[in-house]
Image (cartoon, rainbow, N blue to C red):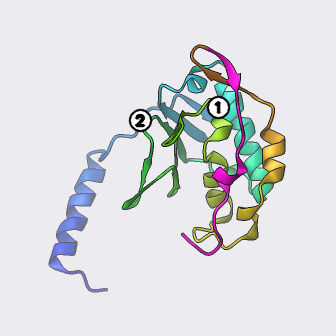
Amino acid sequence: MRVHKAGASLLLAATALAACGGEERQQPDFVIRGLEVVFETDAPFAHRPDFPARVESTIATALAYWGGSWSVLEGSTLTLVGAASVSCGSEVALGCYDGDLRVTTRDPGIGTFSCVEETVLVHEVGHAAIGDLNHEDPRWMGMEEVAAALGNRIGYADGKEAACPIYPSVWRHQLGTP
């Protein structure tokens, strides 16, 4: 393999950064079955005592739908972000899976979600479980059974209980497009 001088310099810099610790990984707020969970949000649902159980049950429901197992998430980090979007490569999106999961807790149009089930977490778990980055699998257009399983849960807003509406359209994606 031929390495260009610029490539070699970048490789040396990356190696040096890695040796010095590189970018520090944030300490998780909690860990579920080997998945580190970090929240960088002030969304009320993320600060409730039932939050870890809600994240776990949402992911378990998504994994069951996609036919995946917790092993695909072991060693990864889920970060819930309070901004209206997350970075995903050179793009911005409501969620991203690149070995780690990042999801926003805000909808750019309606504001902060009232529960974790409203986020695109189910969608991003799909990417982790089946590795379908181009949305070729027809299950991307379904998700009614996931919505039914996660429906009727309580959300939180303004310091009190609120509705937790589930919109499967948030999780769906046009087939054959990244």
Give whichever of 70, 164 is nearer the camera: 164
Disc 2 residue type? Gln
Q: What element carries label 2?
A: loop
Give whichever of 80, 77 is nearer the camera: 80
Q: Position of residue 20 (x, y in %)?
A: 26, 46
Disc 1 residue type? Cys
Instruction: Say which residue appears at 47% left-offset and 30% top-offset.
Output: 41
Q: Is mark 1 on a helix, strand or loop?
A: loop
Q: In which quarter of the image is the N terminus?
A: bottom left
Q: Quadrant of the C terminus?
A: bottom right
Tell me the residue that label 2 is attached to.
Answer: 26
Above/below status of 82 relative to 154 = below
Instruction: Say which residue appears at 51% left-offset and 42% top-offset.
Output: 109
Above/below status of 71 relative to 36 = below
Instruction: Say which residue appears at 25% left-offset and 52% top-offset.
Output: 17
- Residue 64 visible: yes
Q: Residue 115 carries which label?
A: 1
Q: Position of residue 76 (x, y in %)?
A: 55, 48
Q: Which of labels 1 and 2 is toward the front? A: 1
Instruction: Say which residue appears at 27% left-offset and 59% top-offset.
Output: 15
Question: Is residue 70 left or right of 108 when viewed as pictured?
Answer: right
In the image, is residue 162 part of the stretch drawn in magenta? yes
Q: What stretch is highlighted in magenta?
A: 160-178
Badge 2: residue crowd in 10 Å (few <14, some 14–19, many ≥20): few
Question: Is residue 119 left or right of 146 when viewed as pictured?
Answer: left
